[in-house]
Amino acid sequence: MIAIPAVDLRGGACVQLVGGSYAQEKVRLENPLEVARSWERYGFERLHVVDLDAATGQGSNLALVRTLIADAGLPVQVGGGVRSSELVEELLEAGAMRVIVGTRAIEEPDWLADLASRHPGEIIVAADVRERRVTTRGWAHTMPVDILDLVEELNGFPLGGLLVTAVHREGQLQGTDLPLMEDVAELSNVPVIASGGISSMQDLRALEHRGLAGAVIGMALYTGALDPVVVAGEFRE
């Protein structure tokens, strides 16, 4: 299982939010490029870059995203407000390893089917989950869809992965939602990446033991709850 540091962008800065709430910004670092370089120096093998402004329709950090991809010496998976085929292609051409799509992919499966067929293995679907229900539009809209029903639907697509974020655990350092992640990993035909609440080496080892392919880590790295050298050394591709 690979550990992937999160570089979440808001207003040109690197931030961390608590509980998926844009009103609860706990961490703000003004130089995302230096943040990304620091994770590379610690030995991580991939970056997870998300444009939070684009995800919520409050702006765009696309120029910064392109700069981060170009500057990074390691593969980057990127998402946040990616709702057009043109933007997917632009990000892949800019050098992204994989592009993460969420809201439109879930709400318009025909669009996802076309996208995945044209970019097999390069698309990650992001399923943000609050108490087993799928949320979209930057966590603002909760759908009457159980995550396991969505996983079954996605099993027919040639995806590069499925990113499951436990929004109810996001940024709270209270541990991952292990039963959720275990159920998804067991059912999914594609590699599953866990996100939300990961706060200890025990969390990471438990996820690996249950077949998760990756784990996106944010708050625990930014607050020092996890030692980046130790994490990067143990959890590699």
Image (spheres, rainbow, N blue to C red):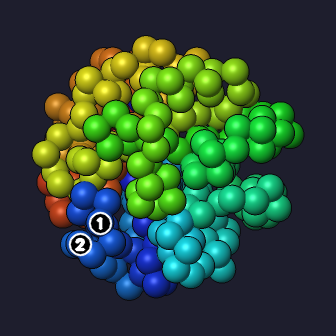
Q: Amino acid at mark 1?
A: Ser
Q: Which residue is mark 2?
A: 24
Mark 1 secondary-structure assignment: strand
Q: Which mark is residue 152?
A: none
Q: Toward the viewer: 20 or 109?
A: 109
Q: Pinpoint residue 61: horizontal percent, then vertical percent.
A: 58, 78
Q: Residue 39: tell me if it is visible.
A: yes
Q: Which residue corresponds to the image point at 82% horizontal and 61% vertical from the top-left?
A: 86
Kindly check if marks 2 and 1 are in contact, taking CB atoms under 8 A apart as contact: yes
**Label 2: how many residues lie within 10 Å, few (<14), some (14-19) or many (20+)?**
few
Q: Toward the viewer: 77 or 174?
A: 174
Q: Amino acid at mark 2?
A: Gln
Q: Toward the viewer: 136 or 102?
A: 136
Q: Residue 207: tell me if it is visible.
A: no
Mark count? 2
Q: Which residue corresponds to the image point at 55% horizontal and 61% vertical from the top-left?
A: 80
Q: Quadrant of residue 118?
A: top right
Q: Which residue is mark 1?
A: 21
Q: Which residue corresponds to the image point at 30% horizontal and 79% vertical from the top-left?
A: 28
Q: Pinpoint residue 10: horizontal percent, then vertical percent.
A: 44, 77
